[in-house]
Image: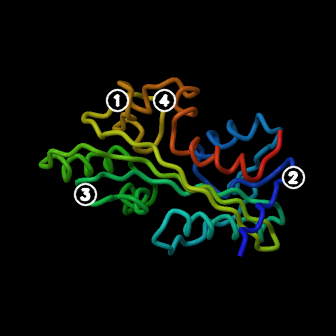
Amino acid sequence: MPALPHRRLTERRIVMASHNAGKVRENAALLAEYGIAIVSAKELGLPEPAETETSFLGNATIKALAAARASGLVALADDSGFSVASLNGDPGVYTADWAEQPGGGRDYAQAMARVEALARPQADRTAWFTCALVLAWPDGHVEGFEGKAMGEWVWPPRGEKGFGYDPMFVPAGHAETFAEMDPAVKHAISHRAAAFRMLAEACLEK
């Protein structure tokens, strides 16, 4: 059977199914040139659904559908994570879980230190970020895309401009970590940018 055509996004205002300010900020910047504004799930008071899937696309789909159905708006969800080759791809889909604190909140400095402690004995410093972007409509239709940024992990962490594990990741072909780069440079080469290019080609119109 021939592949069905992608659904085009015609709405000018959508909900970002995330309570992560960094993700909301980066996706809002990517969508701005298409004239699309974002309101975050946090601004709308939407709850965060349990992420029970074992893939980035699966978890992004859960979040996007929950936000679309709760808000009545088209929703964009971003599920992303940091993976280390010598840790068999961990923390991967559990990237945020590695930063969870017993009393609530997330400590990414502690999470990065855990990665370093476990990966240090290995010679392989290969690492990558993965981002899955899913658009969901209130009627249940979804469009999903996944991008990667390859590179290596470094220690100690460097830079103050990023979030999450950005300070310990140097993308291939560069000397600065994601957290040291000018945001515009990072946006052009990141895993999120790679996924967004696919989404834009399939679903967006300037």
Q: What amino acid is found at the position of numbered circle 2 in the picture?
A: Glu
Whichever of labels 1 and 2 marks the residue nearer the N terminus, that label is 2
Q: Distance between the residues labelled 1 and 2?
A: 39 Å
Q: Distance between the residues labelled 2 and 4?
A: 31 Å
Q: How far apart are marks 1 and 4 (CA)?
A: 9 Å
**Dot 3 surroundings within 10 Å: few (below 14), some, or many (20 or more)?**
some
In the shown orientation, is residue 22 left or right of residue 46? Answer: left
The reply to whether discs 1 and 2 touch (Cβ–Cβ < 8 Å) is no
Q: Name the residue under label 3.
A: 87
Q: Mark 4 points at which residue?
A: 161
Q: For the point 82% across and 44% down, which residue is it?
A: 205
The reply to whether discs 1 and 4 touch (Cβ–Cβ < 8 Å) is no
- Callout 3: helix, strand or loop? helix
- Measured along the vertical axis of the image, is residue 193 above or below residue 8? above
Q: Name the residue under label 1.
A: 158
Whichever of labels 4 and 3 marks the residue nearer the N terminus, that label is 3
